[in-house]
Amino acid sequence: MSSTAHSPIALPRPTRTAKGSESGIWIALFAITMSFAAFTSALFIRQASTDWTHIAAPPILFASTAVLLLSSLLMELSRRKFDGKPTSRIKEGGKGLMFLAATLVFGFAFVGGQYLAWRKLATQGLYLATNPNSSFFYLLTGVHALHVLGGIAALAYLIAQLAARGSVRRNLLNGVVVYWHFMAALWLYLLVVICVRL
Amino acid sequence: MEEALKSQAHAHAPAEGFLRKYVFSLDHKVIGKQYYALALVAVFVGMVLSWLMRFHLVWPNAKIPGLELIAKTGAPGGIITPEYYLSLLTMHGTLMVFFVLTNAPFAGFGNYFLPIQIGAEDMAFPRFNMMSFWTTFIAFVVLLAAFFIPDGPPISGWTAYAPLSAIGKDAGPGLGWGQNLWVISIAIFCIGQLLGSLNFIATTLDLRAKGMTLMRMPISTWAWFITSCIGLLAFAVLLPACLLLLLDRMAGTSFFIPSGLVVSDRLQNHAGGSPLLWQHLFWFFGHPEVYIAILPAVGIVSHVLTNSLRKPLLSARVIIYSMMSIGFLSWMVWGHHMFVSGMNPFSSLLFSFPTLTITIPATIITLIWLGSLYGANIQINTASFFALGFISMFVSGGVSGFFLAQPSIDIYLHATYFVVGHFHMVMGVAAIFAIFSGTYFWFPKMTGRMMNETLGMLHFWITFVGTYCIFMPFHYLGLVGNVRRYASFVDDFMPALMPLHKFITIAALTTGAAQFIFFFNLIHSRFRGKQASANPWKGTSLEWSIPSPPPWNNFGGDHPVVYHDPYQYGLKGSTGDFVMQTSPEQILNE
């Protein structure tokens, strides 16, 4: 049996800083990655069937891709504009806020582009249940667009907070930035899948 | 940093008003209790369903008064039809796996105790936490709604195998809106669990108190943390699977429905889908789900047992590493549920190997528990008995896993009661024993009152003996080829086994009835139980350093500082044979 000496000991090392929203977003990205991995696995298994065909990706997808990448760039520029002082809150700053607003507009433009792509497919007689390729097209683009809309909602909240209160928690901005970049990267992956596999 | 900590920890003020305090509460303790209460309701419904099934198996023509009121077509005149038996089977499995085994040990106890055990004032995202419970609650209501629609609950089992689950009402009773409700319910449940898992991980990583290094976290906290990592990834796969199934059912896609399928004399308007795809997606979630149920149980039992033994386990660290190994390996074994699904035999071999490997960390954990019993001054109380009961169930149910892990043996046993016996013992009842152990152990902290030990012991012994009486014979039934999922064996199938089935049914009714002792104890003790002190079990972890029940902000606004590993038992501390994690006294040889 060990024994104890009743003298105070030195304080152990402190725990790390709470990161809040930013940690939450990083964790959520693992789940989103897993979901799209599941969709991809489903696609690989389903394409073994004899009714697997080919659909041409609507050209508007490439324009949407450019819009989304540009929005990601604007988001990054905005983050750097806010990156002045190492404080836990960021203050409303002219250009940073302007870039954020532009990102929001480009985000909406991307979702609009996806909608046009769906319309284009529909005019070709390709609907959700027409064939497995069209099913996966609508599924992958639709679920991704839903995630982008989630990002748009978060971005709108961030802008509204900045506009109304003049400041916002830095980890909220960081979380939204990370999420937005991830959506762009995920879209690039999906575009490759769509062009190569569908 | 202080500001950031404050913004996280004090994410909400003390609750005021009935709704904010008890219904839409942001307090992790209230949310934990809500999950626990939901699991209690679900386990009661699930237990009644199992009674109905057992009753029907041995007395298939008996009339059950009142049943026709709920199931007009499923039980006309109170007599259960074979199809309704399958509905009961589906709902029993779904309720127990999702709403009991996931809710109570993980979401219930985890919500209540994870923040306290790491010294946090609440979860990282209290609003998400509230949302995760109410999402789960909605999922529960949607699932139960299937009982009250004309279609009735689905008959496709808790695994909802396609194409049966994907076609629609042509395929049989309950497969129209009943199955739709099932899929929607499980999809909603996934969202709730994803929110919950995210919260657990962020809380563990970001909100630990000063000095609470990862290795100073109690084993229970580690178990909840590892489980939330598994849950985050597993439910992220089940959710897309449910979406695909819903699209097949409602939008006319063909992910899971093959070509040329004729059901009820009708050629189905689908082509090219893969029924095996559903099984792959489902079991890729489904096997990790087994560990979502059992790892928190392992954590709770290790935590309770160390306290009861009054000495540290042989190695808490090895238990933590073993739980991590189990969590890692859980992703590689899903195919062992599909040995008879028509997979390539070489694939079976590939899944068999990691399945057998996973028994190594499980055995290491068990041996550490058993080895730690040697020379221990074990405390006789209900919590420790249920913890020991858990080990017994875990071993008894686990041993049959060695047989099922081998494809050549599983092909014979797969569709029999052997499998039912195996998973009920190792996953179902074992986890339930851990829930009981956790309840008797933490009830004083959660309510400020002690549970009645005499009733507790009575409850333990009836449940322990009863469980063996129910589930051990299942293995023998399986060995002689008694198939599972059949609604009746009386007229044309194995009448010689009926006496054993009757014995099981009587044991199930008796053991189930004994649970009312627990319900009574729970409610009676809540209001009339002996007042509990802050640390009635002389525990060392942080939950025992605060009043029973804890104040709304857990530590009364203080920031606890942690000085020691979580299990400093069996030494000469200033207050007894233990030193609390928050005690600044120095321990030699720590």
Image: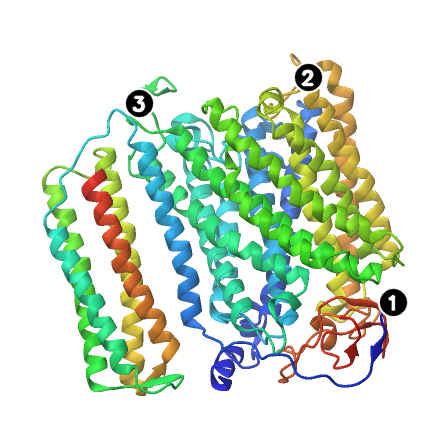
Indicate left or right for A142 with B52 as reference: left
Quarter of the image for residue B361 reads top right
What type is the residue that disc 2 sits on? Answer: Val
For mark 3, give the secondary structure: loop
On screen, residue B174 above or below A24: above
User: On screen, B517 above or below B279?
Assistant: below
Task: Specify few, some or many for label 1: CA neighbours under 10 Å numbering under 14, 14-19, or 20 or more.
Answer: few
For label 3, count other residues whose C-alpha is less than 10 Å away and answer few (under 14), some (14-19) or many (20+): some
The x, y position of residue B247, in whole percent, is 33, 40
Query: For residue A176, what is the image quadrant?
Result: bottom left
Q: Nearer the viewer, mark 1 or mark 3?
A: 1
Q: Residue furthest top?
A: B492
Which residue sits at x=33%, y=64%? A179
Q: Is residue B38 visible?
A: no
Coloring applied to the structure: rainbow
Q: Residue A1 shows which numbered tag?
A: 1
Q: Amino acid at mark 1?
A: Met
Q: Residue B436: which numbered mark, if any?
A: none
Q: CA distance from mark 2 to mark 1?
A: 62 Å
Question: In the image, what residue occupies the spot 48% across and 61% down?
Answer: B198
Residue under label 2: B490
Q: Chain of mark 3?
A: B
The residue carrying mark 3 is: B259
**Residue at the (64%, 56%) spot, across then down:** B320
> Spatial distance from mark 1 to mark 3, Cα to Cα?
71 Å
Q: On the picture, is A170 further left or further right than B558?
A: left
Q: Could you tell me how far apart the alpha carbons at marks 3 and 2 are, in whole angstroms?
A: 37 Å
Callouts 1 and 3 on one subunit: no
* Image coords of residue B146 (percent x, y): 49, 41
B237 sits to left or right of B441: left
Residue lying at the far front of the rendered structure: B589
